[in-house]
Each structure stands twice: as C-alpha cells, then as structure tokens.
Image (cartoon, rainbow, N blue to C red):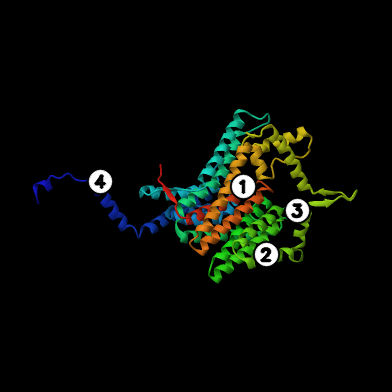
Amino acid sequence: MSIASEHRPRDLAAEVRRDARLLAERWSGAGPAFAGIVVVVLLMGASVALDYEFGQSPHRILKLALGLLVVGGIMLRPRFGLLLLPLFTPFLGLVPPTPIPGVNAFNVLIFSVFGAYAVGEALARRPILRAGRLQGAIGILVLIAVLSIVRGAAVPTGYSYNAHLASLDLFRSGTSFAMYFIFLAMARGERDRRRIAWAVLIGLLLESLVCLKLGRVGRSERALGTYDNPNELGCYLAIFTVLAAAVAFGVRSWLARLMAVGVFVLGSIGVMLTLSRGGMIALVGGLGIVVLRSSRWALGLCLLLLALSPLWVPSYVMDRITSSAVEDNGGGDVQVDNSSEIRLITWRAIMDVVEHHPLDGVGFAGLRFVLPNVGRAMGLGEVADSAHNTYLRTLGDMGVFGLLAFLWLLWSVWRLADAGVRSARSRFDRSLAVGLGGAIVTMAICCAFGDRFWSPSVSSGLWVMCALVEDSVPGQRTTAAA
C-alpha cells in the first residue's frame, strides 16, 4: 500500500450511503412485514384505548381501524391510493366530520396519497409535478374566487357576508382540483390509465348498487344513495355512466365490455331512481356525444330507445318529467310546479344582484347570504339560499370575469378531450377521451339545473379523467419541486 493512500482522508458521506444501501438490501424482504406488525400493534393499542379509556362504540373503533389500515397502505405504497381515491370518493360523506375547520376525510385521503408519493420522489431527486393544459384555467378561476372573497370582506354589499365560511367553502371545493394535479403527477402509462379508469367505474358500480338497495327512500320518493341530495347523486351517476358507455366501446375483451355495459345499465337505472330531471337530461346529452364519436349503429339504437321511451320508462319517471308544467284547474292556464317556481323566483333575485354588481359580484359563496334578503326586499316571497344554477351562481358570486373564467375552464376540458381523441395511440385511450368529452357535456348540462361544479363528491372523478386523458396526450412536461 502506498504512503499516499494511507494518508488519504476518509469520505464519511460515501461510507454512510454505502452502509445505508447495504442495510436497505438486507431489510428489503422483512421491511413490509415489520411495517405490518407495527401497524397491527398500533391498531390494537388504539382499539384498547378507545374502548376502555374513551368508551367508544365498536363500530367507531372498526371505522378507525379501517381508516388507519388504508392510511398505512397508502404510506407503504402511494400508488395504491390512486385506486382508492376514485373508489371511495362517493362514500366519503358517510365518514363523520372532523372537529377541525376545513379538514375532512377527503382532504386527509388525497394529501396522504400525494404526501407519501412526494416524499419518495423528492428523496430520489426526481421531479414531482407535471405541467398540465388545465392549470392556467384552474388557476385563474381560483384566483378570481380568492379576490372575490377579499372584495366581499373589505367592501360588503350591504348584506351579511362571512369571509371565514366562504374561505372554508373555497378550500373544500378547491380540493377537487387537487385530484387533477395529483393524478397527473402520479399516473404514468396506459396500464395506470386502465386501472384508474376501472377504479372510477367500480366506484360508480358500488354507488349504483347502494342506490338500488335503498330504493327511493328520500323526500318525494327519490333515491339518495350515499348522498343527501338526489340531484347531486343524479349528476354523479350521469357523468360516470357516460364514461362507462365510452369504455364499453374501447375495450376488446368481451368480459370487460360486458362489465362496462352492466355498469352503464345500473348507473342509468340509478339516475332514473333519483328522479333528477337535470341528471336524466344530462345523461342523454353526454351519451349522445359518446355514441356520435363511437358507433353509428349505437346512435341509431339510442334514438330508437329514446323514441320508444314512453313504452319502457317507469311511470313515476314519466310523471316526474312531465310535472315541470301542471294545468291550473281554474282557468286552464299552464303553471310551473313548485320546484320550478322556486327556481324562477330565485333567478329573478340573482339577476337583481347582478344588476347592481355585474363586474365584481358579491363574493365567493356570497349569494347564500344575500338571496333571502334580496328576495324579501323585492317582495318575491320564498327565495332559496342556493342559486340552483352554477352559471348564475358564478355570475352572482364572482361577476362577469368569474363567469368567463368558468366557461373557459369548461371549454379547456373539451379541448383536452378532443386532443386526446386525435392523438390516441390505443383504442382504450380514445374511448377514455371520448368519455371525457361526454362527461364535460354532462357536467355542463347539470350545472344548468343546480350547483354541481363545486361539489367534491360530484366533480372529483371528472378531474381524475382529465388527468388520465392528459397523460395519454404526447408532449407532457415535468416540473421539479420548488
């Protein structure tokens, strides 16, 4: 050995990295088993503490145990969470609310998935995020919403405005946009796209089965499923039933096609059980886009079924469709039904608000504070605190610029779907893009009948579809973490 090598300084950093690598190789097989043992011990300890110290009921302990198992699985394998997110999104409303303002099961789940993934990518010195085609439109819409909250708090309209509640509402609603960025960052390749798309359809299948099991148990004998609002349930079912129809055209296996058709049929039945007129009209509109771009014979079959609908559609559904106008027994005049009348009165109040605040609006989520007062001032009687229309709500809350940003976002999603159809390299990718085009048309129609866009349980899956289609479009760029 030479004298120079004897006096060479030790590279401590290299030795630490070498020892860590050797340790990781030794524990690579036992690591998951050890982690599983730790999770089980923690679950047992938590169960004992909750049972004996806090007196919690067994079903709450079971829910906590399942939740911890899910979070533990996500921490070990973040991509496992990509399949859970669209699968569990419709059922997150069943989880009891947390006492922390702005924090709910949906937020915890999505940020657990992305947090575990981001830590691993950062340690490996790989880019975390990818630039997307929709990030500009989403960013502008959210920015206008934030500025409208500041405007509503700083310069009130003369009626009450709660900036704190509006900020929490924007945070909860805005987390649905996070689904787009998370899935765009984590989903890579056609295999991921197929698995996640099927996870979305399985979520639709489970919700449809719950809807069929419970039946029309809500007010006015309308199905609720796991939702409190039958109109929100109808919109959710309509959007992803359209996706199921598109996937049925895009798979080659007869078993997979039969499964997609089965999900489509169950979803369609669920929409009818909700008696949501907006959901039914939106389903027809979105399905029309899918069959126009997929199959001529399917288009002819759909037109035939639509023409024969009085023969096969249940009577309670036909009564719901035709009840938007009822005949006055006194003079033979035609009047609108009660729900439609409330909408018309509410829209008159909104137009009065827009007349006074056309550019700036009253602040995000501000119409619910303003509408009842405006209705009383105008002598309109009963005015709901909901706009019953996303376009009018956006116009009243954020003014003309907010409405234009919202329309631009819808148009950007349509352009993304069209780009996915034109650049598709496989039959499945094309069907996924066609399904996105039909889904955004379905959402646009549903927004004319209610405030659906800002509901995470309704729209989150739509942003997952956007990310999957964008992953199939060539030319995606990566963005390193700041």
Residue kind at label 1, given as amino acid type: Phe
Give the label, 1 or 2, closer to the camera.
Answer: 2
Q: Earlier in the sequence, mark 4 or mark 2?
A: 4
Is 310 displayed left or right of 41 in the figure? Answer: right
Q: Quadrant of residue 354?
A: top right
Q: Earlier in the sequence, mark 1 or mark 2?
A: 2
**To which residue does mark 4 refer?**
13
Q: Earlier in the sequence, mark 3 or mark 2?
A: 3
**To which residue does mark 2 refer?**
302
> What distance separates the C-alpha of mark 1 from that of mark 4?
52 Å
Label 4: element kind: helix
> What distance separates the C-alpha of mark 1 from that of mark 2?
27 Å
Label 1: element kind: loop
Label 2: element kind: helix
Label number found at residue 453: 1
> What distance separates the C-alpha of mark 3 from that of mark 2?
29 Å
Q: Position of residue 30 (x, y in %)?
A: 35, 59
Is 136 displayed left or right of 356 in the figure? Answer: left
The vertical placement of 282 against 167, above or below, is below
Asked whether the viewer can see residue 206, the reply is no
Give the label, 1 or 4, closer to the camera.
Answer: 1
